[in-house]
Image (cartoon, grey):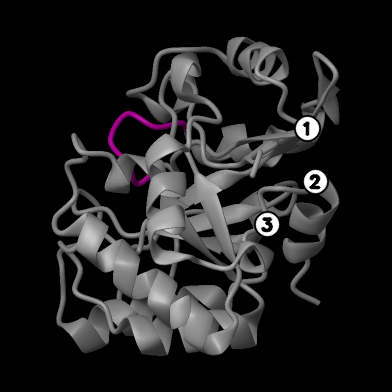
Amino acid sequence: MLDIVDLHTHTYASGHAFNTLYEMAKSASEKGLGLYGVSDHGPAMEGAANRFYFIAGNRVPDYLFGVRTLFGIEFNIIDYEGNVDVTDMWAKNLRYGIASLHDVCIKPGTRKENTWAYIKAMDNPHVNIIGHPDDGTYDVDMDTLAKAAFEHKVLLELNENSVKPSGYRKNSRENSIRMLESAVKYGTKVIIGSDAHIEYNIGNHRYAHSLIDQLGFPEELIVNKSVEETLEALKKN
């Protein structure tokens, strides 16, 4: 299966990435992507852009270098009630949102607290994707998470940085397997994200696909194969 979509990428604005938006979009074009998304970290992440950067998202063209381009965000979940670091007023011009738990922004809680934080974040109309829920730093009930994602029309992310051999997240491959098994159980759709912090890695989903092939995960539950399907999956209403 050829992926033509990558919505989890970072630019200089995240504070710890290596390329500009235009460099990333050009790379996406050269690699044949049909849909490229920029999802820089929200301001609770050390070194990331402030809220004014995100409200200016409507200034980014719909196409860059011939590639459909979406300006989004990787929200930081900042408490166990699922609140995020960019409020509605400042998020109104974003095209999509990934909500993630990062240990520099929130301390790991209990399994119940971590799972509830994700689920409550799904109530946010700007949250379309749960980012790297495989990170074992945050113990999660995958069955409950997948069921809630299906009900909220939110995508679960299979993160390339988590499943590659050099990945740094705790027990991430094993947790990704549990997530995919739960997704099958509830019919929850999944999106693969490169989590690229440098243009070289845009669209690189090698290890994610290896895991999918190993498990025989159903292709119809993965949205990356179609621009239209991905855009439809980002609609929550």
Residue 34's mark? 1
**Whole-percent x, y for residue 25 in the image:** 67, 19
Q: Residue at x 59, y 54 (%)?
A: 97
Q: 126 or 140, which lies in front?
A: 140
> Is 94 rendered above or below residue 130?
above
> Is residue 226 visible in the rendered structure shown here?
yes
Crowd band around label 3 with a 10 angstrom C-alpha radius: few (<14), some (14–19), many (20+): many
> Is residue 131 visible in the rendered structure shown here?
no
**Could you tell me how many numbered marks the image carries?**
3
Residue at disc 1, secondary structure: loop
Q: Quadrant of the C terminus?
A: bottom right
Residue 227's mark? 2
Residue at disc 2, secondary structure: helix
Q: Are marks 2 and 3 in contact (CB under 8 Å)?
A: no
Q: Are marks 1 and 2 in contact (CB under 8 Å)?
A: yes
Q: Residue at x 85, y 18 (%)?
A: 66
Kindly report the secondary structure that dominates the magenta region of the rendered protein: loop
First reached walking from the N terminus: tag 3 or tag 1 = 1
First reached walking from the N terminus: tag 1 or tag 2 = 1
Q: 153 or 61, which lies in front?
A: 153
Kind of residue indicated by mark 2: Val
Q: Quadrant of the N terminus?
A: top right
**Whole-percent x, y for residue 108 in the image:** 15, 68
Give the extent of the magenta segment: 44-49
Kind of residue indicated by mark 1: Gly
Report the Cα–Cα distance between label 1 and label 2.
6 Å
Rendered image quadrant of residue 128: bottom right
Residue 223's mark? 3
Report the Cα–Cα distance between label 2 and label 3.
8 Å
Rendered image quadrant of residue 53: top right
